[in-house]
Amino acid sequence: MSRTVLYMSMSVDGFIAGPGAAPGNGLGDGGHRLHRWFLPDAGASSRGDLGHLAGADREVMDEAMATGAVVAGRRTFELAGGWGGDHHDGVPIFVLSRRRPDPGLEWPGVTYVNDVTAAMRMAKDAAGGKDVLVHGARTARLALAAGVLDELRIHLVPVLLGQGERLFEDMPPDHVELEPLRATDGPGAAHLSYRVRTEV
């Protein structure tokens, strides 16, 4: 059964991007450090060849690249240049947005949706039984609030960024219970997997 899974690299102090995130600097100032565990040149805009990875790092990336659809927030999508319309293997991409797409970010296989629940449902339907890869801090928070995020896969990078964008900024005071699934160490990150508990 298809699951919606957030994949996110995060500093030990909870940041998923440095300050000053903008097109051409999508991870903000110093934020590229968060992706060095899987990209040899973390400042590069392309995903690059992942053949250099081994062990837990390789397993995590193989899982991410085996997903059957992607849901991303509009800001994440635009900061990434829309991945050129192809996140991986031509899987469908659903972009959470309340505005019409910019002409330069329209590609076949990219669908703009204005509701997180609808976006997750459409992505699961399109994923053909595979998991759905979720990108973006704001999208993750909306999905948690709506009860449509199934798992979190946090890649905890041993660095303190000190400032930037936090993954769980401005969450409501409700408790979200997580069930630990797996913890593995790679050379550049600790990979932590949690299931979102629907019953407390």
Image (cartoon, rainbow, N blue to C red):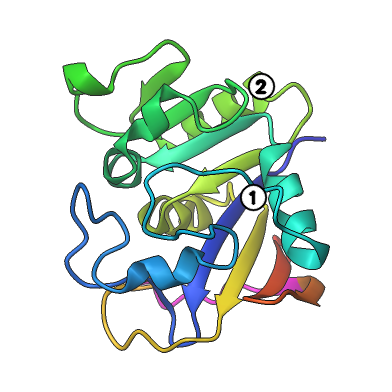
Q: Quadrant of residue 1?
A: top right
| Residue 81: in magenta span | no
Please, what is the three-letter code of the amino acid marked with disc 1?
Val
Please tell me which residue is depicted at 41% across the width and 23% down the height of the picture: 85
Where is residue 25 drawn, in percent x and y? 23, 56
Where is residue 127 drawn, in percent x and y? 68, 25
Residue 137: numbered disc:
none
Q: CA distance from mark 1 to mark 2?
A: 15 Å
Horizontal relation, residue 2 to residue 46: left or right:
right
Q: Which residue is mark 2?
A: 125
> In this rendering, is residue 99 above or below 164?
above
- Can I make out residue 196 in this image? no
Where is residue 34 drawn, in percent x and y? 46, 70
Please tell me which residue is depicted at 27% across the width and 23% down the height of the picture: 105
Question: Are discs 1 and 2 less than 8 Å apart at CB?
Answer: no
- Magenta stretch: helix, strand or loop mostly: loop
Q: Which residue is mark 1?
A: 5
Please, what is the three-letter code of the amino acid marked with disc 2?
Asp
Where is residue 30 drawn, in percent x and y? 30, 74
Specify the segment rendered in magenta.
171-179
> In this rendering, is residue 103 above or below 194?
above
Q: Quadrant of residue 158?
A: bottom right
Instruction: Answer few, some or many: residues within 10 Å of disc 1's Cα (few below 14, many 20 plus, some between 14 and 19).
Output: many
